[in-house]
Image: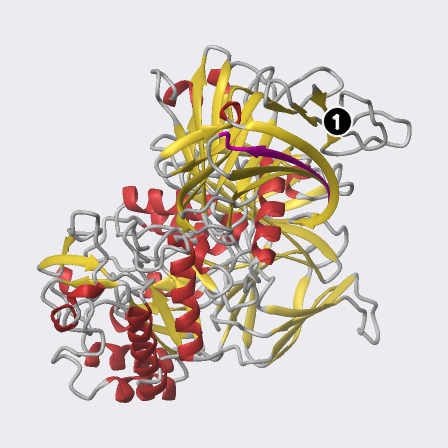
Amino acid sequence: MKTTIGKSIHILNCLVLLIMSYNAIGQQISGSFSVDQSAKTFQVGREKSGETWFAKATAGFKFNGQWVLLKDLESKKVKRTTAPSTFGMGDKLVWTFVHPAEKIEFHLEFISYPDQDWLTINAFVANNGNNQITLDAIRLMDTDMGFHSGGNWEDWRVLSGTTDDLKWTGEELVNEGDRITARTQMGLWNAITGKEAVLGFSIQHAWGELNLGKTDQGMKLVAEVNLDIDLPSGKKGYAEALHLKVGPVLDAMNELLKVTGEEVNALTSGDSYSGWCSWYGFNPFIDNDITEDVVVDFAKTAEEKKDTLPLHLMLLDDGYFTLPGDWTTLRPTFPKGMKHLTDEVSKKGLVPGIWIAISLVHENSDIIKIHPEWVDKLEDGTPKHTQFNWGGKTHSFDISHPEVLQHVDSVFRVVAKDWGYKYLKLDFNIEPGPKRYNRRITSFEAMRNMYKVIEKAVGPDVFIANCAGSPYPPSVGIARAGRVGPDVNPNWASVLRGCKQSLLHTPFHRKWWVNDPDCLNMRKVGSQLTDVEVQSHLSANYMGGGYVMFSDSLNKLPADRERMLAQALPSYGKAADPINYMKSPGAGIPNIMNLPIEKFGEQYAITAVFNWEDRTVDTRLNIQDLRLEPNKEYHVFDFWTDTYKGVVKNEIDIRSLQPHACQLLAIKPVLPGEIQIVSTDLHLLQGTMEISGVERLNTSPFTKAKSEIWISLDPVSLREGKLVLAADNGLRIAAVQGGKAYLKKRNDGLWDLNVSELQDKAAILLRVR
């Protein structure tokens, strides 16, 4: 018997559950989902044209080390209900199975939403037997017939890993058994057909994983949720919901991350911090140890330079403690103690922050000698985690153990209450293994519980940021910021890797938390980075909308690099759009980041165009892709080269962009006959941050001016630089308030309005007679 549910039809032996409903005239606008009770399979993506995305799919669960799929179970009933789910009120189809030998029920759920183009698949296992079982995993979909009509299998690009890598199926799926793995989310784009889709899990209590392979019938897709929990008699074990949408990957990712974040009360309104982290410039691993004096010196210098370098955060990283585990035992390089340090930093107007990896413990630490039983171990009694670092082996604590959680609570009460730290950077996040103390919860839940203990211990005034995981779902809802990139060192290979991860993670910003793309390396001594490469790294971090952090000695920073850093302060807080998210060339790093802006009655864009390759490239921008109105004329100006590219319409050609370079373009509509601000060199957003007002009026009392503009400036960092203006000949300064200014005609026909000694409030009146 075959059962299908449709939106407004019911056929005796065939119920069709639509993902997206029909329109007013009955035309199907997207795919469908159907189940076949006799074959014990289901299908996703039957469109009116007959296209199928996933065919003859099965599901099941693993208990006591053995997999049981639908074919191994007895199909009992199919029931239709209506219930709220991730994307709102949905039509739910519940398919119930029973294990023939055990009193275990398996409930497979399919949900469509009348107002959303999404499908949700979920499941749970009910242990109705007399004995406790180990529920290892739940498989929500397993098919050898994926993307059946979706184009050649070699032509799919897959957003994989932890949403940090783009891979081509034709390059990765060569041999039998090859697979592409994605944790939590996967994006798909076919370069031939243009088809796109996103699959992703909720993040409430367990890790979901997606594996893609190649078969003779199409593509193999396996979506399963790792649980590894003890399920007593009479209890239920739930999967993490899987969500599917056929459509543009970037849009679908934005939607998915928003709703999955909302399910766990994601904290998305935190500050996009700017500041200093000690790690890359000062730590014991590079024999340039962090000391109390280094921190105090930074704080003093930051206060002295606060008018042009508005830094907010001092983040003390590794090097203050004796060994991991003994977090409150300080090295001799901090003789006056942490309370003295946080007081000094706070007096200089900075937020004092500190790095801790609380689940990590060193083999020679005092705490492990006192509590060796806290170490998380495997079946054979060996530590689950072993890493060589800090001159020996490090292991991890079983953070599901109540005594360990009490220890976590006490450490963070010292850090926040006694020491006075207001910002926590939490690293390593080592989840407990199969022998953990509390096996009624997943390792994912154990880590989230640890974060909750920390949150309660430090109170609501302490900012919690996640460091390890890139990104790390168990911390969402507690952490206000999340690391979205790897450690970045001062060489191009490292910067390239960091930019790839941070830009691919752009959609997470202000949906799960505030993005932290890791530090900039602004120094010249000890760095392999050229000025052009630093400009690209700075632009990439800034256009992500999150943190702007650096890790160099502030009083030794070269003047040109210090100015470059100042041009990126403060953060705008809003992420730019990665225009070619799935379709970027070369190594698969988005190479066009676009920030649409509406201000002073103008709709314009700040657009970063990158060349991540080792050769010169050409790029073409479409005005409509930048969310600008077509068939209009626009001024185009490159910030980094101080180059006017002229007036364009509909398309912008970037010719011969040098290897590793970036052009940061201000694209502003031409205003005929008006004095217009085309760009500034005071900030990367070229007038968006530092210009607070533009008034076009005519105050000339005798001879009427051809045009006139009153520009108000509220400097956010630099107090000296220039505004680049488009204006007719005869432009003159009529008045200056709160600074100094003079005009100079450029060779390209524009004007440089050079400004200096700007006060907090400044204004300039310009006029063309």
Q: Residue 325: name its quadrant.
A: bottom left
Q: Is residue 538 above or below residue 404?
A: above
The region drawn magenta spans 89-100
| Left or right: where 738 falls relative to 382 | right
Which residue is at the far front? 130
- Is the C terminus in the top left, top right, bottom left or bottom right quadrant? bottom right
Would you say the magenta stretch is mainly helix, strand or loop?
strand
- Is the N terminus in the top left, top right, bottom left or bottom right quadrant? top right
Closer-to-camera residue (664/477): 477
The picture places residue 546, in percent across and down from the top left corner, at 48, 59
The picture places residue 467, in percent across and down from the top left corner, at 36, 59
Which residue is at the far top? 216
Q: Is residue 55 above or below residue 761?
A: above
Closer-to-camera residue (47/101): 101
Closer-to-camera residue (666/85): 85
The picture places residue 149, in percent across and down from the top left corner, at 60, 15
The picture places residue 710, in percent across and down from the top left corner, at 70, 71
Indicate the amino acid at tag 1: Val
Q: Which residue is mark 1?
A: 16
Asked whether 95 falls inside the magenta stretch, the response is yes
Give the residue displayed 62% in from the left and 68% down from the top. 691
Closer-to-camera residue (418/588): 418
